[in-house]
Amino acid sequence: MNFIVMIQGNVHFPITLDPTTWIFDDRKIDLDTYFDTDPSAEEQPSTEADHTARRFARDREEGSNAPDPDPGRGRTNKVRNKKEAIINGSFGIRFEPFLENAEPKEDASHVVVETEAETHLVSLEEAKNFIVAFSHKGSPLKEDGPVHIYYGDGSNKTNPIRHVTGFRVK
């Protein structure tokens, strides 16, 4: 199976995506809880700069924690917990930053999600809200991947678009 997916077509810059590297991306989303939370309850940063500014402000207000000189037994190990979450978790990532980096041309209005068997035509605005799943329970999507597409509203969370081979902007 080819794990590389392309964004091409009516864009200024065709983009090659490798979903196997996204597990290391801080922007990844935990799909086990993402669609169960109220999106208005958690304010999403509108840009990468806003996200960085909020993180800086939080660090400045709260400061950093000094390492515990005696970690002792029975205390939780944050690194181990994070590693276990990655090993056992199901993750996705927002499609919008990748689509923006491809820079759709001014006359672009739709995105075609290409799969092994069919195509799905959606508006450019709807595609910006896609969540691109790349792992399930700690494993890459080898059987029906390399990625699955979830609509941002979660309307297809039980039946995502599978066997995605690429994206074509029209």
Image (tube, helix red, strand yellow):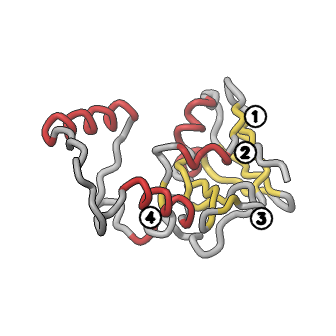
- Which of the two discs, 4 and 3, labels the residue nearer the N terminus? 4
> Of the numbered discs in the image, which one, if any, rests on residue 34?
4
Dot 2 and dot 1 residues touching (CB under 8 Å): yes
Q: Amino acid at mark 2?
A: Phe
Mark 1 vs mark 3, CA separation in Å:
24 Å
User: Residue 169 or 2: which is nearer the viewer?
Assistant: 2
The residue tagged with tag 4: helix, strand or loop? Answer: helix
Label 3 sits on residue: 144
- Residue 17: x, y in percent? 69, 39
**Quarter of the figure with residue 105:** top right
Q: Amino acid at mark 1?
A: Gly
The C terminus, quarter of image: top right
Label 2 sits on residue: 167
Label 1 sits on residue: 9
The residue tagged with tag 2: helix, strand or loop? Answer: strand
**Quarter of the figure with residue 118:** bottom right
- Residue 61: x, y in percent? 13, 38
The residue tagged with tag 1: helix, strand or loop? Answer: strand
Mark 4 vs mark 3, CA separation in Å:
21 Å
> Of the numbered discs in the image, which one, if any, rests on residue 43?
none
- Residue 109: x, y in percent? 63, 40
